[in-house]
Image: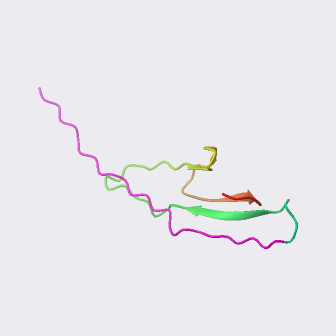
Amino acid sequence: MTVLAEENETPVADAGSDQSLQIPHDGDSEESYVVNLDCSHSSDGDQDSLAYTWSDESGNTVCTTSDCNIDLDSDTY
């Protein structure tokens, strides 16, 4: 018997355009800002389900859905 693996099409990740958020300097370092992360236009040619993980620069997971809003403290990301 010969078992042949089914070919798999590579998923296509689409996180949209780059975003830039300019925060006005008002001296309030405790304020946070909402940023929308959206990769809902990503697809898989085989129609397999997709899993999503958004991570910050330290590797911490910040969201696990295709479209989410996250609060960012005043900082550089």
Q: Residue at x 40, y 58 (%)?
A: 43
* Viewer-side residue, 32 vs 7: 32
Residue 2: image quadrant is top left
Q: Is residue 12 above or below residue 51?
A: below
* Viewer-side residue, 31 vs 67: 31
**In the image, residue 2 lies in the stretch drawn in magenta:** yes
Q: Is residue 51 above or below residue 28?
A: above
Q: Residue at x 38, y 57 (%)?
A: 12
Query: The N terminus lies in which quarter of the figure?
Result: top left
Query: The C terminus lies in which quarter of the figure?
Result: bottom right
- Report whether 1 appears left or right of 50: left
- Report whether 52 appears left or right of 6: right
Count of marks placed on residues: 0
- Where in the figure is residue 54, as x and y percent of width and height? 57, 51
What secondary structure prevails in the magenta region?
loop
- Where in the figure is residue 42, as x and y percent of width and height? 44, 60
Colour setting = rainbow
Task: Please state the extent of the stretch shown in magenta in the rendering.
Answer: 1-25
Q: Residue at x 54, y 68 (%)?
A: 18
Q: Residue at x 23, y 42 (%)?
A: 6
Q: Residue furthest right?
A: 27
- Where in the figure is residue 8, as x and y percent of width and height? 28, 47
**In the image, residue 13 lies in the stretch drawn in magenta:** yes
* Viewer-side residue, 42 vs 17: 17
